[in-house]
């Protein structure tokens, strides 16, 4: 049922940044993935959706090397990632950044120190002054105030923690960004601002983004394509309109259920010039209305 054109994907191999073939993952008797295929194209924001426990995070962990699959092939930037020695794996890892679910900040480190972790790990020769400078730049780049650098995660709001996690993910100037439920737990306004931040960084930096989400507004607002996980594999990948045309019960319920319709309505309502020009941290009142309008149920989805 996949909408993607696999033969074309193979021809345009250079434009496939992540290529997962025939992936199998299991934990004991529990099989999570079986025969899973997925390609992420250069420069796209690919949303990854699926019911709870369908294996979205396990898929991301497999791609970034934190989970060794039972079977299958994974290449990132054209390089196989499974079974590489430490140096080879490090060279690939340097080229991506990861925002884990919940931010995964080190609680005993300040925001600036958190951002510095990958720099210290991968570039041991950088001077402390340069590391400080890069970290300060990344903090501001994600819309945090400059004085957030010396703060500890416990002193930050949920939205600020996400931005700090994003700053750390961007520390190494990645080409590829993995985001695991970046808007979960944020209020609708904060989530909309975070969507805009991701999109604006993606455009400015030319990033490819693998984005796991339950957030329908995020899918509509910023994703170029969406991959749907069900039945242990990616059952479909395409634009939202392409997915909506498919006759699969879960996809139909997901996009045509009350929350899917509300998100769709919000999208159709459009974005004003003022909103398009707004700084990622500034959400104009008009948008607040749009996000809230018809999407009351979506608040629960965002907060879940
Ligand atoms: N380390 C592990 N050991 C055993 N089982 C695991 C492990 N990690 C994940 N699982 C199981 O794998 C399945 C998929 O988990 P995963 O976290 O990938 O789901 P998900 O689609 O991201 O879910 P959610 O949307 O709720 O975050 C779940 O049943 C989970 O319990």
Image: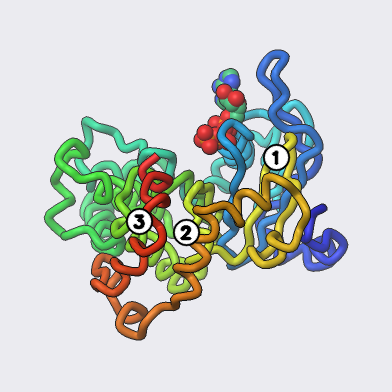
- Where is residue 49 shown, x and y percent of the image? 59, 47
Q: Is residue 29 left or right of residue 103?
A: right
Which residue is nearer to you in this view: 48 or 91?
Answer: 48
- Where is residue 126 shown, x and y percent of the image? 33, 51
Q: Specify few, some or many for label 3: CA neighbours under 10 Å numbering under 14, 14-19, or 20 or more.
A: many
Task: Give SS at disc 3.
Answer: helix
Task: Give SS at disc 1.
Answer: strand
Residue that label 1 marks: 230
CB under 8 Å between callouts 2 and 1?
Answer: no
Q: Earlier in the sequence, mark 1 or mark 3?
A: 3
Residue that label 2 marks: 218
Which residue is nearer to you in this view: 241 or 118?
Answer: 241
Q: Specify few, some or many for label 2: CA neighbours under 10 Å numbering under 14, 14-19, or 20 or more.
A: many
Q: Is residue 149 left or right of residue 91?
A: left
Instruction: Please give the label number shown on residue 67.
Output: none
Instruction: Please give the label number shown on residue 191.
Output: 3
Q: Residue at x 33, y 56 (%)?
A: 188
Task: Give SS at disc 2.
Answer: helix
- Where is residue 68 shown, x and y percent of the image? 66, 28
Quarter of the image with the C terminus is top left
Question: CA gap, disc 2 to disc 3?
Answer: 8 Å
Question: CA gap, disc 1 to disc 3?
Answer: 26 Å
Instruction: Find out if the beta carbon at label 1 lies less than 8 Å from the nearest ligand 1 atom.
Output: no
């Amino acid at each position: 049922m996949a909408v993607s054109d696999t033969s074309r994907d193979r021809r345009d191999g250079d434009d496939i940044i992540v290529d997962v073939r025939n992936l199998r993952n299991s934990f004991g008797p529990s099989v999570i993935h079986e025969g899973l295929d997925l390609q992420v194209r250069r420069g796209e924001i690919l949303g990854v959706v699926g019911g709870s426990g369908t294996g979205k995070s396990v898929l991301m962990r497999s791609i970034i090397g934190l989970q060794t699959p039972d079977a299958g092939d994974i290449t990132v930037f054209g390089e196989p990632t499974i079974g590489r020695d430490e140096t080879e794996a490090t060279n690939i890892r340097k080229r991506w950044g990861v925002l884990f679910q919940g931010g995964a900040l080190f609680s005993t480190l300040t925001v600036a120190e958190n951002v510095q972790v990958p720099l210290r790990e991968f570039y041991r020769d950088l001077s402390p002054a340069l590391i400080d400078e890069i970290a300060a730049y990344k903090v501001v780049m994600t819309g945090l105030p400059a004085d957030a650098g010396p703060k500890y995660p416990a002193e930050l709001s949920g939205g600020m923690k996400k931005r700090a996690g994003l700053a750390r993910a961007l520390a190494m100037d990645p080409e590829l960004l993995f985001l695991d439920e970046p808007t979960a737990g944020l209020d609708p306004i904060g989530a909309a601002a975070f969507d805009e931040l991701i999109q604006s960084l993606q455009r400015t930096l030319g990033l490819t983004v693998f984005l796991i989400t339950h957030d329908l507004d995020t899918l509509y607002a910023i994703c170029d394509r969406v991959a749907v996980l069900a039945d242990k594999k990616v059952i479909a990948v395409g634009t939202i309109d392409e997915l909506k045309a498919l006759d699969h019960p879960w996809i139909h319920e997901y996009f045509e259920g009350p929350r899917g319709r509300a998100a769709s309505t919000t999208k159709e309502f459009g974005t004003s010039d003022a909103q398009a020009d707004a700084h990622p941290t500034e959400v104009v009142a008009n948008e607040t209305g749009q996000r809230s309008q018809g999407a009351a149920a979506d608040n629960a989805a965002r907060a879940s």
